[in-house]
Amino acid sequence: MTGETTGEVLKRLAGLHPRSIDLSLDRIERLLAALGHPHEKLPPVVHVAGTNGKGSVCAFLKAMCEAAGERVHLYTSPHLVRFNERIELFGQPVDDARLLDALKRVEAANGGQSITFFEATTAAALLLFSETPADRLILEVGLGGRWDATNVIARPELTVITPVSLDHQDYLGDSLGGIAGEKAGILKPGIPAIIGPQEGEALDAIERQAFRLSAPMTLHGRDWRCWSEQGRIVFEEESLVWDLPAPALIGGHQVDNAGIAIAAARALGLGEEEVRAGLSAVRWPARLQHLTRGRLAELVEGGGGELWVDGGHNPAAGEALARAMADLEARRSMPLVLVCGFSASKDAHAYLKHFTDLARWVIAVEFDTGREPSKSVAEVQAAGRAADIMCDTGITLTAAIGRALTITRPAPRILVCGSLYLAGQLLAEIEGVTPERTPG
């Protein structure tokens, strides 16, 4: 079809399966076979799973590999503003023309058969990665691990599992051990694995799978540690200690993420200088990001406040974010106001309870850009009140930020949080564009 857009093809692909999530490998393996098995023609792959910190670990590792002079591809999801963000070729989102061509070839090869949106678009990404020579591909799992569409890679160079916590229980189960077992589905026979900090039940499940597959593990706490010290970080192995600059990504949880990435970089043969440069160069939007440009940021700063955004959306992310905001409060005291929206399936109270005695107000908002509906403002307000935080609401995100700016004196530190989709909406408004809505 002459003149069609990537959005039109994405919309057609989204209509090929009645559910946005249906975990399986059968459909994508069929499609990849029809495309000539592009997943077997990739650069060396680092496959990353986990509940929290996957994207940040990928960003850290990418920056370290690039500091070593490598050409790096990156696959992440979901996107914040434009779908193209999910597929990075040599550090840049794929351009519209190449993306459109890949999507159309995927659509033709699929022949109208049932396939989920994420499976089809992952196939398009793998096609692009296979046709663009690079030194490395960093591949982030979409959901879970065992049955995720990215788990078609039979022999990655390295696997990584970031901290596992409760999330997506509808698809992965409601026990920490069960969820960790699903994440550990990316482990492969004989392939080295970097394992980040884990709770006991999760670590037990991961270790059982690694033992079954004879996958050698490098474990946090046993083989390496990473911690903050006097404004810097220290990475330690049995016979190695590196004194390194603090990561460019803010928050104590990013020290943990940096440590995982450093352990992975070590496994890939990178040295201290590449790690040092990557820690300083890393960029990853909507991960405790201080916004200083654009109309909304200028409005807040003009009123004496600060505007921050974070896309974490589960209880563990809420806990890590609250610790980071407490650190900011200790450095410069300002009233904290949360502008919050959550996807319908998320536990807003379990997230917000970490902000009791820290946040002055919750301003509840809704969004319509996610793969599932958002919670109503009434639900978010109820969760905020249950956490003993005063609540209000905003009709729009812009109105909520305006309300947050005037609700306290002195001027507040405003944190837009609770959902990557809400974070993407804010970044889109900063850029003056409309975020691309997709079902997966």
Image: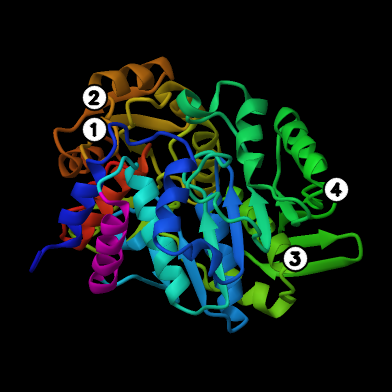
Residue at (22% x, 55% y) in the render: 428
Q: Please tell me which residue is depicted at 24% across the width and 34% down the height of the picture.
A: 407
Q: Earlier in the sequence, mark 2 or mark 3?
A: 3
Separation (CA) of disc 3 from disc 1 = 43 Å
Foreground mark, 2 or 4, reads 4
Q: Amino acid at mark 2?
A: Val
Q: Position of residue 322 (x, y in %)?
A: 51, 38
Q: Which residue is mark 3?
A: 267
Q: In this orientation, which residue lies closer to the viewer: 102 or 163?
A: 102
Q: CA distance from mark 4 to mark 3?
A: 15 Å
Secondary structure under badge 2?
Answer: helix
Mark identifier at residue 110: none
Quickly name the residue at label 1.
365
Image spot of residue 418 (x, y percent): 38, 36
Mark 4 or mark 3, which has the lower sequence index?
A: 4
Residue named by callout 2: 377
Crowding near the residue tagged with mark 2, few <14, some 14–19, many ≥20 C-alpha atoms within 10 Å: many
